[in-house]
């Protein structure tokens, strides 16, 4: 890091007391929940929603909205970090762990392409999706997830930048090799760890 | 130990986008009461695509840092410099710093250009829909088009609250190229569009939805309604690109 500093800058939006160590480098504390999407918000009714796991797997599986709700749901308290610099602390979602969705599927590859209604994709290593690190969620802070935030269901991977938490999620395809998804093809990092500030290709 | 010959990797490295560098502010334009444009000369400049952004990082004497992203407003033909147009958000910390503190000659730390989705790469015909400061990346597209392909069909529909909020007012060619609508107060004698962007305004722009490409930028509410108008007009979803301005204080 250089010894450069900005003339006359004191910093007037520092995180609240005791929260500074929960804000990754280059992020700022945001109390709201901004909306950022690359295209129009799709019209997607819960009755038309489904989720599937396929690709290089022992057994592909899929769930309708009704079937999905027979699975065990968990509350997920978390902090989330958007690559556009805001971090939201102490929020919560409710949904089904990806571990549950992968039971009996027998993934044979180490990577996944997560895909959405509307065509969005994002790639993740399977190790970032398993062991209690990722969920398919349908509720945010006790309310059904709104369409603009990805409802009826979105992926939630709070330990990575939030573009990995695909809105309107439709499924995940297990792959042998890592391949770039939508933002990862458009200049953003393949992995996206906010604590290592993996924002863009060369980070 | 000092190297006797330059490290070839070091010579190449600065050319990659994304390295922090210290630019110098060489011009400031007050666009509206709350919007200023900053021309920043860069030691390591690389051409951007219209629509891309730079990250800006401020550092306080105690090491505290704040970063934000700002769209580039200039054409990549302006080599050696970028122009960032910044809306002053009262509860922010980077935009008020730029507005209240930064003067010509000041140094600012930036890196870019970034992101390759909300960019114009020569597609045509083009319809641009901008709400408020969402016009900034669209202005980079319009400025670049004027210089590289003046005859290329590109139309801008620009929604602002009132006349004082029109960014780049002296540069916008109202009529053929740009149509403005005033959502709150129109200037005296105004005979053009009033109220929110609507289907009639999209139709009057004359960009064929069957072949047209659209870029829409503004607040989330603006972009949602603009996207809906474009879809209803017959633009294919894959040819509608949107960028929503979140809080970028």
Image: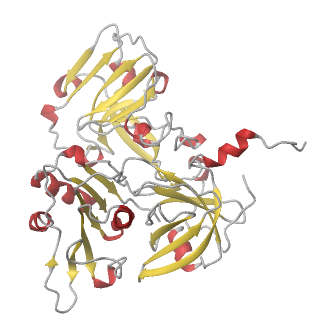
Q: Is residue A153 above or below residue A96?
A: below
User: Position of B204 compared to B247: left or right?
Assistant: left
In the image, residue A9 lies at what x, y percent? 64, 71
Q: Quadrant of residue B52?
A: bottom left
Where residue A189 sits in the image (x, y, percent)? 50, 38
Q: Answer above or below: position of A133 versus B165.
A: above
Residue positioned 35% across, 11% down in the render: A57
- What colouring method underlies this structural image? secondary structure
The answer to which of B126 and B237 lies nearer the viewer is B126
**Residue in the picture at 58% in, 63% down:** B80
Observer able to see residue A16: no
Any part of residue A128 in sight: yes
User: Image point 65% across, 76% down: which residue?
Assistant: B105
| Quarter of the picture holding the N terminus of chain B | top right
Residue placed most toward the observer, A170 or B204: B204
Answer with left or right where residue A150 lies relative to residue B39: left
- Write down the quadrant of residue B7 in the picture: top right
- Place of residue B112 in the rendered image (x, y in percent of width and height, measured from the top left): 54, 54
State the image coordinates of residue B244 (x, y, percent, origin top left): 33, 57
How many numbered markers are drawn? 0
Extreme residue toward the top, this view: A58
Determine the residue located farthest toward the right in the rendered image. Answer: B1
């Amino acid at each position: 890091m250089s010894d450069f500093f900005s003339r006359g800058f004191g910093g007037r939006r520092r995180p609240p007391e005791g929260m500074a160590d929960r804000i990754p480098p280059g992020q700022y504390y945001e109390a709201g929940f901004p909306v950022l999407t690359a295209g129009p918000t799709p019209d997607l009714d819960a009755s038309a929603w489904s989720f599937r796991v396929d690709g290089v797997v022992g057994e592909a599986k899929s769930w309708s909205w009704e079937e999905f709700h027979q699975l065990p749901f968990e509350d997920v308290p978390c902090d989330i970090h958007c690559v556009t610099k805001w971090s939201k602390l102490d929020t919560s979602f409710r949904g089904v762990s990806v571990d549950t969705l992968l039971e009996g599927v027998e993934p044979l590859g180490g990577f996944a392409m997560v895909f959405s209604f509307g065509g969005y994709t994002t790639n993740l290593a399977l190790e970032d999706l398993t062991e209690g690190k990722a969920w398919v969620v349908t509720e945010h802070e006790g309310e059904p997830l709104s369409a603009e935030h990805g409802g009826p269901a979105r992926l939630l991977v709070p330990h990575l930048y939030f573009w990995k938490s695909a809105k309107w999620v439709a499924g995940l395809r297990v792959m042998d090799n890592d391949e770039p998804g939508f933002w990862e093809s458009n200049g953003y990092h393949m992995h996206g760890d906010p604590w290592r500030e993996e924002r863009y290709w060369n980070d | 130990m000092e190297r006797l010959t330059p490290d070839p990797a070091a010579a190449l490295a600065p050319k990659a986008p994304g390295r922090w560098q210290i630019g110098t502010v060489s011009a400031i334009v007050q666009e509206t009461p709350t919007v200023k444009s900053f021309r920043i000369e860069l030691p390591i400049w690389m051409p951007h695509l219209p629509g891309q952004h730079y990250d800006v990082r401020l550092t306080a004497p105690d090491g505290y840092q704040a970063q934000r992203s700002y769209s580039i407003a200039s054409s990549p033909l302006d080599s050696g410099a970028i122009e960032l147009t910044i809306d002053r958000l009262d509860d922010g910390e980077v935009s008020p710093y730029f507005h209240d503190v930064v003067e010509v000659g000041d140094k600012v730390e930036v890196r870019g250009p970034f992101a390759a989705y909300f960019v114009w790469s020569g597609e045509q015909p083009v319809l641009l829909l901008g709400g408020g400061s969402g016009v900034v990346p669209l202005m980079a597209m319009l400025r670049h088009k004027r210089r590289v392909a003046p005859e290329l069909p590109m139309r801008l529909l620009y929604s602002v609250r009132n006349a004082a909020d029109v960014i780049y007012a002296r540069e916008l060619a109202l009529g053929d190229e740009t149509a403005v609508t005033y959502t709150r107060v129109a200037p005296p004698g105004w005979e053009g569009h009033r109220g929110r962007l609507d289907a009639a305004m999209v139709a009057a722009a004359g960009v064929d939805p069957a072949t047209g490409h659209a870029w829409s930028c503004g607040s989330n509410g603006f972009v949602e309604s603009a996207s809906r108008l474009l879809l209803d007009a017959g633009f294919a979803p894959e040819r509608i690109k949107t960028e929503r301005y979140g809080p970028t204080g």
